[in-house]
Structures are given as C-alpha cells and as structure tokens.
Amino acid sequence: MRLKKSKGIVLSYIKYSETSIIVRIFTREFGLKSYIINGARSKTAKSKMAFYQPLTLLDLVIYDKEGTSLNRISEAKLAMPFQLIPFDFLRSGIAMFMAEVMGKSVFEGFQNEEFFDFLESTIRLLDEKDTALVHFPLVFLWESSRFLGFAPQDSESFFTELKQYPQGPDVMEEEKEYLDVIIADSFHCDYKFPSKIRRNMLDHFLLFYGNHLDLTYDWKSVKVLRQMMS
C-alpha cells in the first residue's frame, strides 16, 4: 500500500456507523472512489464534515490499494474555501444539482483528467460574484455531455435524437435557438430567453441524460432548480 496525492471533488456522502461516513470523491488521478472517514461526525473529529459537502474541492493524500472498493484518506485539505456557494441560495441550489448530475453520470473507477479539470474550473466559476447564473445549469449539462461522450452536434440533432416533441416540432423553434446559443456561447451566454423556454430546455436535457445513462429514478434537486428558473 502506497500513499499518493490527488485533487478531488466531493460528490456525496452517507452516514456509516455512529460517527463515520462513506464519501464518494471524483479524483483527478484515480477517478471516482469511495472513502471511509472514521469518526468524521464525532465532536473531536480531525476531519471536519465541512470538507465533505458536495462539490468541495480537496487536496488529498490517499492510501492506494488495488482491488479495494472502500479506500482510506491519509490527509485532506481544502483546495479552495468557498466564498459564495454555501451562503447564496441560488449558487448552493446549482451546486446541489451539479453534484447530483455528476453522481448519476460518473461510475465507480471512471477517470478522465480533462473532465475533472472542466469540473474544477466550473465550480470555481460558480463561486465568483460576477458569474451570470441564469443559464449556468443548462450550459453545465451541455458541456458535461461533451466529456461524457454523448453531446449533440447541434440543436437539430439533439431534438432528433430525443424523439420527443411534447408540443410538436414546429413549436420547438425557440428551444432550438436557445440550445444553439448555449452551444456557441457556453458560460458567456448573456442572451435573454423566457423562463418557460429555459425550464422546457432543462426538462429536455434531463430526458436526454436519462436516455443515455439509462436512469430510472427521479432527480432530487430539480424541483428547487426549476423554481429558481422562474
């Protein structure tokens, strides 16, 4: 067993025994791994629970042992203390959504350094005060689909693949225009689209992800996110 360093992004955690947790962390070097943190919930814990909230960026020293499904962390440090995300309702809601998307899209052992770098820069962008948030979740879904391997070339191919026109293909022109703007402008998108179109596009993207990832359960964070998009 050897000690190795890696950056990591926390996706989620569950309680384990009386004072411990099992945390899922997407690491840059080793992909998605599960780690047990003994005593994390005890009053005298050395590892603060704040370190293991969704989307926290960590610098890690981990025990690397092949063939182990549950690993251990030797040392964890905050790579970036958040300034806005935990204290801003909209940003924290987007962060919850991003963590859920990643948790459903990335499987155990999945490793992609370029995807990690994109996620890290996106999380840092979310924590900046001048970042426009109105299109942020949808841009995140589009950009992530590129790294996950199922991004559409354009809006026409997106809706053709989706094979679902809830209001008929002729009524989808605004959604198509919106998606083309997102594809072209990414996080720099500042075009104003009606909230109804943005909510519709969110529903289309979630169906698109569900089809590609074979998801059969609901998105927990979407209800809050949809309210934010009103």
Image (cartoon, grey):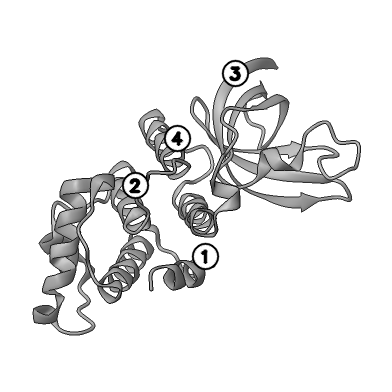
Give the residue at the far top of this rendering: 2
Give the secondary structure at mark 3. strand
Q: Earlier in the sequence, mark 3 or mark 4?
A: 3
Label 3–label 2 contact, CB within 8 A: no
**Above or below, comparing residue 200 to residue 118 in the picture:** below
Q: Residues within 10 Å of mark 2 (few under 14, many from 20)?
A: many
Give the secondary structure at mark 2. helix
Mark 1–mark 2 distance (CA, rounded to whole Å)? 17 Å
Q: Residues within 10 Å of mark 1 (few under 14, many from 20)?
A: some
Mark 1–mark 4 distance (CA, rounded to whole Å)? 20 Å
Q: Earlier in the sequence, mark 4 or mark 2?
A: 4
Give the percent coordinates (x, y) of residue 213: 39, 58
Mark 4–mark 2 distance (CA, rounded to whole Å)? 12 Å
Label 4–label 2 contact, CB within 8 A: no
Q: Earlier in the sequence, mark 1 or mark 2?
A: 2
Q: Nearer the viewer, residue 129 or 93?
A: 129
> Which residue matches tag 1?
221
> Which residue matches tag 2?
144
Residue type beneath disc 1: Ser
Label 1–label 2 contact, CB within 8 A: no
> Which residue matches tag 4?
120
Mark 3–mark 4 distance (CA, rounded to whole Å)? 17 Å
Mark 3–mark 2 distance (CA, rounded to whole Å)? 25 Å
Q: Nearer the viewer, residue 37 or 93?
A: 93
